[in-house]
Amino acid sequence: MLKLHFAPNSRAGRIVWLLEELGLPYELNKMAFHPKDLKSDAHRARHPLGRVPVLEDGDITLWESGAIVDYILERHKNGGLKPAVSDTSFPAYLQWFHYCEGMVMPSINTIVVHTLLLPEDRRDPVALGQAQRLLTRSLGPVNDALEGKDYLIGDFSGADVMLGHACFMANRMGCVPEEMTQLKAYVPRMAARPAFQTAITMQ
């Protein structure tokens, strides 16, 4: 059985969401988002930097969320929630799948650091403001791509698990303006999915 090492309010939430969408059995090791758990010797043996998610599948251990999503889809669902390479939607799938970590999550990480992780006297309002503005700009192309579609490539896919989770976080941070009407409709559409509801209740 798959085992997921998880902490709330982290990228691990997208893995729970995916596992629930696919109906795959899994064991969950829920840890506190705190150094006492994440930086413990036991967890550092799983992830050298003491982060989540970490997926164990027998003697295989993976700890990069995008790699985990792709691994699960290929090895445990025979490519489900992922278009075939020959499909016309495959290039868009790849783009939005990787756009998440390349363009959206770096700004989210900076916002989290300067609003939650650092003590108040070390938070930088300039860096925070820059990250908030960059996050909003990075979501513009996503909003445009959703024109006339319920999900990023039309049907729900692994790209929505990756980028949609980030859009949910960005919206919660107040970085999705009202004029991004497609994104404003997309976020609650995802959040209404039963599998997402299960994942978010763990946050």
Image (cartoon, rainbow, N blue to C red):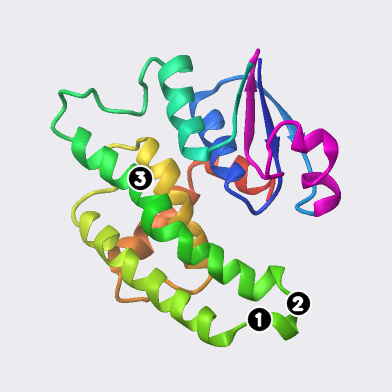
The residue range painted magenta reads 35-59
Instruction: Residue 123: give its label.
Output: 1
Kind of residue indicated by mark 3: His
**Residues at discs 2 and 1 in contact (Cβ within 8 Å):** yes
Three-letter code, disc 2: Pro
Badge 1 crowding class, 10 Å Cα cut-off, few under 14, some 14 to 19, many 20 or more, is some
Which residue has dot 3 on it?
Answer: 98
Q: Name above or below for residue 90 compared with residue 160.
A: above
Q: Which mark is residue 119?
A: 2
* CB atoms of marks 3 and 1 within 8 Å: no
Tell me, yes or no, whether the two marked residues, 3 and 2, touch with CB atoms within 8 Å: no
**Residue 147 image point, x, y percent:** 20, 57
Classify 10 Å Cα crowding around label 3: few (below 14), some (14-19), many (20 and above): some
Q: Earlier in the sequence, mark 3 or mark 2?
A: 3
- C-alpha separation, residue under disc 2 versus residue under disc 1: 7 Å
Residue at image point 34% right, 51% down: 99
